[in-house]
Amino acid sequence: MRLVSEDGEQIGIRPLPEALSIARDLDLDLVEVAPNANPPVCRIMDYGKFKYEAAQQAKQSRRKSTAISIKEMKYRVKIGKGDFDTKTAKVEKFLGEGHKVKLTIMFRGREVFHPELGMRILERVAEHNAHLAKVEASPRLDGRNMTMVLAPDKRVQADWARRQAEEAAEAAGGPNGAAAASTGSDADTNTAAATPPPPAPPQPAPATTAQE
């Protein structure tokens, strides 16, 4: 077999008894890491430590995969402007962090007979966050609740970021704006130079003194 040390150095081709003896002398394990190679590759290592590190890496991977969750935000049909703005700002924050958001409209009493009121609120929230997300699950009525799911859209976010950058460049007076301003200034100067000055106003005739 091809033997590899704990530090990853190539020890060379060794028979199995010798490889086991080397591992025992180091108080370590002999682990076959590439059984299909020719010859097979074995590595000297602390197998218990190796399993622990592998488990930790798997745990970290699971944690990252579950970090993006579905948040929920609930609205009332008769919600006030202040509450609407506060809740919608939180929805925007969740979407910006990469979370999906489930929007729930809760109907009370006879409000359930006017689902269009809930639709208007959902449409307003979706429109407010159109630069971040797309509608993943269309609005649907489930008992006394109406739900809709928004999901982050990287393409939409990239387009919005590009437009924001372009608007910022224009506001700061980018090269095109400066050239246009310069051209306009030169045109005004040339026009002023080509326009003849206005004629001087006529001078009043000198006064005559009457002779007696």
Image: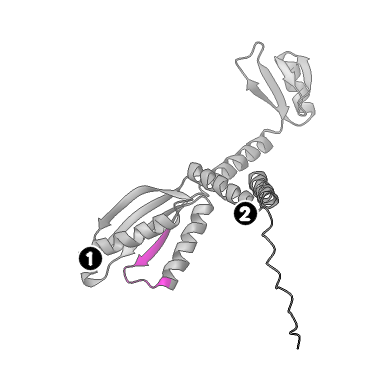
Q: Position of residue 78 (x, y in %)?
A: 32, 72
**Quadrant, the N terminus:** top right
The residue that disc 1 covers is 112
Give whichever of 20, 176 is nearer the camera: 176
In screen coordinates, is 104 left or right of 31? left
- Residue receiving disc 2: 171
Q: Amino acid at mark 1?
A: Val
Q: Which residues are magenta?
A: 72-81
| Rendered location of residue 61, percent (x, y) | 57, 42
Say which quadrant the C terminus sits in: bottom right
User: Viewer-nearest of labels 1 and 2?
Assistant: 2
Instruction: Tell me the tag on residue 3.
Output: none
Please tell me which residue lies in front, 159 or 167: 167
Between 185 and 167, the one nearer to me in the picture: 185
Residue 173 in view here: no
Give, as a three-letter code, the residue at label 2: Ala
Pointers 1 and 2 in contact (CB under 8 A)?
no
Question: Residue shown at 79%/29% (left/top)?
Answer: 26
Left or right of 33: which side holds 158? left
| Residue 170 visible in rendering | yes
Secondary structure beneath disc 1? helix
Q: Quadrant of residue 176?
A: top right
Q: Residues within 10 Å of mark 2 (few under 14, many from 20)?
A: few
The alpha-carbon separation of the residues under discs 1 and 2 comes to 47 Å
